[in-house]
Image (tube, rainbow, N blue to C red):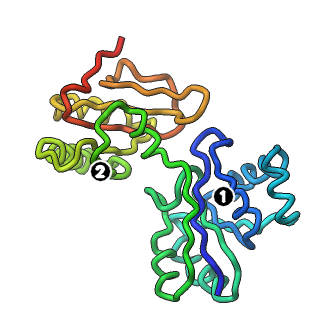
Amino acid sequence: MGTMYIVATPIGNREDITVRAVKTLSSVDIVLCEDTRKTGMLLSYYRETEPYKTIMGLITSQQPRLISFHEYNEDERLPYVLELLQKDCSLALVSDAGTPLISDPGYKLVRECYRRNVRVVPIPGPSSVITALSASGLPTDSFAFLGYMPKKSGKRAQCISRIQSLCSTHVVSTVVVFETPHRIVETLAEFKKSAPELSVSLAHELTKMHEIFIQNASVGGLPESTKGEYVLLISSDKQNRVSVP
């Protein structure tokens, strides 16, 4: 029986990867990835750049096979992937960035692995949720991650109401959600209108050159960017209402 590795990859800066992750991606037979082109470029970078080049060269000179595995083909590919594992192949699952399965597909695969007594090994590393939370200046003793904000306005309003409830009853100290560039302005406006008592901070371009953190985020203070998800951090803690110039 093969082994299923769950490997975290960088969320921005390519140097934010563990030696163990590089070794794992060098030694497996197959890498399951959301986008084979992105993962291929990432692996090429490590094969051509020290000290990763040396690490990968010591393990194998052969590039693992890349197979697409994403939300649109997960159900279709699942039987084939499980068959590979039963044939003693070692596989690694990666997302385009960060820790797999966090608002990404993969839990069905992991569940089926356990049902078939396939060993599952997590290779921990970067996560935009934890990275943003750690540098947000908001309470971190307890938090909830709700994934992406809903696309439809009705469901988004329900989500904001849920966040209000979580914060007002102190079930958690901080709520973390993702939002896309083309909806961030609308979402911030809705928070200001429907939940003015909450402090909404954001993180963007994490670990990259133009990384930013904005406390008490407003529509007018947004950076001009159309790429990359935003991480919103919401809290009712009045002590964290810091004015942004």
Q: Nearer the viewer, residue 51 or 190?
A: 51
User: In the image, what residue occupies the spot 15% across and 45% down?
Assistant: 170
| Amino acid marked by disc 1 | Ala
- State the SS at label 2: strand
Mark 1 sits on what residue? 21
Mark 2 sits on what residue? 144
- State the SS at label 1: helix
User: In the image, what residue occupies the spot 32% across and 42% down?
Assistant: 140
Q: Position of residue 233 (x, y in %)?
A: 33, 38
- Distance from label 2 to label 1 (Cα)? 27 Å
User: In the image, what residue occupies the spot 60% across and 69% down?
Assistant: 5
Quarter of the image that includes the C terminus: top left
User: In the image, what residue occupies the spot 29% across and 20% down?
Assistant: 242
Q: Nearer the viewer, residue 1 or 202?
A: 1
Answer with mark 2 or mark 1, whichever residue precedes in sequence.
1
Q: Nearer the viewer, residue 63 or 72?
A: 63
| Amino acid marked by disc 2 | Ala
Whether 22 is drawn above or below 45: the answer is below
**Snapshot quadrant of residue 183:** top left
Mark 2 vs mark 1, foreground winner is: 1
Residue 119: image tag: none
Direction top: furthest residue: 245
Label 2: few (<14), some (14–19) or many (≥20) C-alpha neighbours in 10 Å: some
**Snapshot quadrant of residue 57:** bottom right
